[in-house]
Amino acid sequence: MRSINNCSAFTKVIVSTTLLLSVGNAAADHEKAGDILQVLIPAISYGATFYLDDAQGRSQFHKSFVTTASVTQVLKHLVKKKRPNGGGKSFPSGHTSSAFQGASFVHQRYGLKYALPAYLGAAYVGYSRVESDNHHVEDVIAGAALGIVTNLYFTRRHQNYMLSPMVGKNSYGFTVAGQF
């Protein structure tokens, strides 16, 4: 199994892509850059599970990804909110929920230092959705919250061991679990 410390390739790809898209499109098409990042962030997050030979993480990614996408679509059909540009199904932002699902997965599974570039990219996706008149600010906030919450529920930290508190009727202590 590869070490999470070798995951700097993930960080480099997200940072360089975000900078390239945002600077290269600063005066141009924020919407297109957001479209690319909303796919790229979860794709690289998922790819990290293969790079790190993390089958358990892959399973957790599947659960959070499918739940995020499903809940997003159900809410779009139930709420039926109009977009600022006149279109329908504005709430929540699917682009933003997808981007934040990928960023939050990395955060929950591998740590914040690896997720910061992905969060910056995901925030840019949200910005691009508002800037292009595809969503209201509250649609983007709801999409981000949805992507984050699914990972809080499904994703556990990647570690070689875990230390947990244990409280009983007449006892207390710690439980240690590990991979050997």
Image: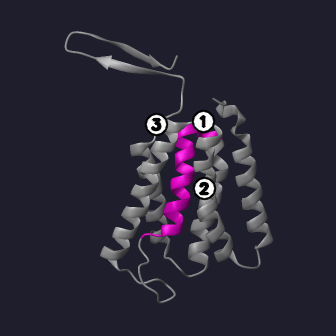
Q: Considering the numbered disc 1 on the image, is that residue within a helix, a strand or a loop?
A: loop
Residue 14 in magenta stretch:
no
Residue visible at 60% across and 80% down in the picture: 132
| Dot 3 amino acid type | Arg
- Position of 157 compared to 45: left or right? left
Foreground residue, 10 or 149?
10
Residue picked out by circle 3:
156
Disc 1 or 2, which lies upstream in sequence? 2
Residue visible at 64% across and 56% down in the picture: 120
Residue picked out by circle 1:
53
Residue picked out by circle 2:
43
Residue visible at 52% across and 37% down in the picture: 55
Q: CA distance from mark 1 to mark 3?
A: 16 Å
- Kindly report which numbered mark, 3 or 2, lies closer to the viewer in this rendering: 2
Q: CA distance from mark 3 to mark 2?
A: 19 Å
* Image location of residue 140, percent across then percent down: 49, 68
| Dot 1 amino acid type | Asp
Q: Considering the numbered disc 2 on the image, is that residue within a helix, a strand or a loop?
A: helix
